[in-house]
Image (cartoon, rainbow, N blue to C red):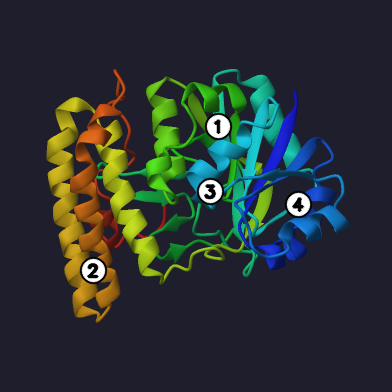
Amino acid sequence: MKIAVVILNWNGKKLLEQFLPSVVQNSPEATVYLADNASTDDSISFVTKHFPTVQIIKNEYNFGYAQGYNEALKQVDTDIYALVNSDVEVTLNWLQPILETFKNETNTAIVQPKILDYKRKDYFEYAGAGGGFIDKYGYPFCRGRIFETIEKDLGQYNDTCDIFWASGASFFIRSSVFKELNGFDVDFFAHQEEIDLCWRAINKNYTIKYNGLSTIYHVGGATLNEENPKKTFLNFRNSLFMLTKNLPKEKLFKILFIRMLFDGIAGIRFLFQGKFAHFFAVLKAHFHYYHSINRNLKKRAEFQVSSYFNRNSIVFDNYIKKRHNF
């Protein structure tokens, strides 16, 4: 079984200097690729000089995460794609447990390792942690992370289990499934496109797994900081895109209506916190969504699973019931 580790890069020389050595050193089973999104720094010359075994793929433009990977992976011939952020440090033998899962479980299409925080290595990292789920209204959360509450890694998720979504920070997928699903939805540009892809895979009756025997460390926010209004815009807009495409027909409009009310409350909260740029980002996200609603409705598949959520409302559980851990 062939595997390719593909790192998407845009002007990330400093990150490559810091993190690429661990990927090259600890991935003898894989061919390592750098997929460059038309960088204007000297990322490519740095990698060519210092890591000659790394294969270079040059995208014509900065396509963002979704289309950037879609374009690059057309040039990668392998069985398994391992999509890895440029701010990820991998550990010894990190690929072996993942490959075993794919070999032993033919219906498993996507796998995520344990994701810990590079800055606090005994804590889980926000984007993925111990495997992802969503609630009825499309809010994502993880084993090890619910909203701002991050759990310490005490071995509580050193297991393997079915999950709903795998983090794009370290995202393993069978190349055949990626092609069957036509890759990431390029309308997302970045953020939550991996959740959308996982949901579409589940709608095709594939399984998604977390394997806690493989560990990586992720910086998180290195490419787009948590406080950036653009990230707020993308997360709010893309959540609505994802729900419109994937919710069961009988639940679609009711769930969307309630989710929009929640978004309104979040926008008002930003307003009272003085975060005016984030308030306008929520408004902009909704205007973009309304403009694109017909296009997203046309993307709906013939079949949508009804059992897509792990909790009714993670917002209610977290803020009202004070349930902060998975």
123 vs 276, nearest the viewer:
276
Quadrant position of residue 255: top left
Q: Which residue is nearer to you in this view: 290 or 153?
A: 290
Q: Nearer the viewer, mark 4 or mark 3?
A: 4
Which residue lies at the image location 63% right of the left edge and 64% below the top edge?
122
Q: Which mark is residue 110?
A: 1
Tell me the residue that label 2 is attached to: 280
Mark with earlier residue (4, 1)? 4
Instruction: Decide: few, some or many residues near mark 3? Use Cα within 10 Å; few <14, some 14-19, many ≥20.
Output: many
Q: CA distance from mark 4 to mark 3?
A: 16 Å
Residues at marks 1 and 2 touching, judged by CB atoms closer than 8 Å:
no
**Residue found 25% across the figure and 49% down from its top:** 313
Q: Residue furthest front?
A: 60
The disc, 2 or 4, on the residue closer to the chain's N-terminal end is: 4
Q: Earlier in the sequence, mark 3 or mark 2?
A: 3
- Residue 241: image x %, image y %? 29, 42
Residue 277 falls in image quadrant = bottom left
Q: Is residue 101 left or right of residue 265?
A: right
Cα gap from disc 1 to disc 2, whole angstroms: 35 Å
| Left/right of residue 153 with respect to residue 141 in the rendered view | right
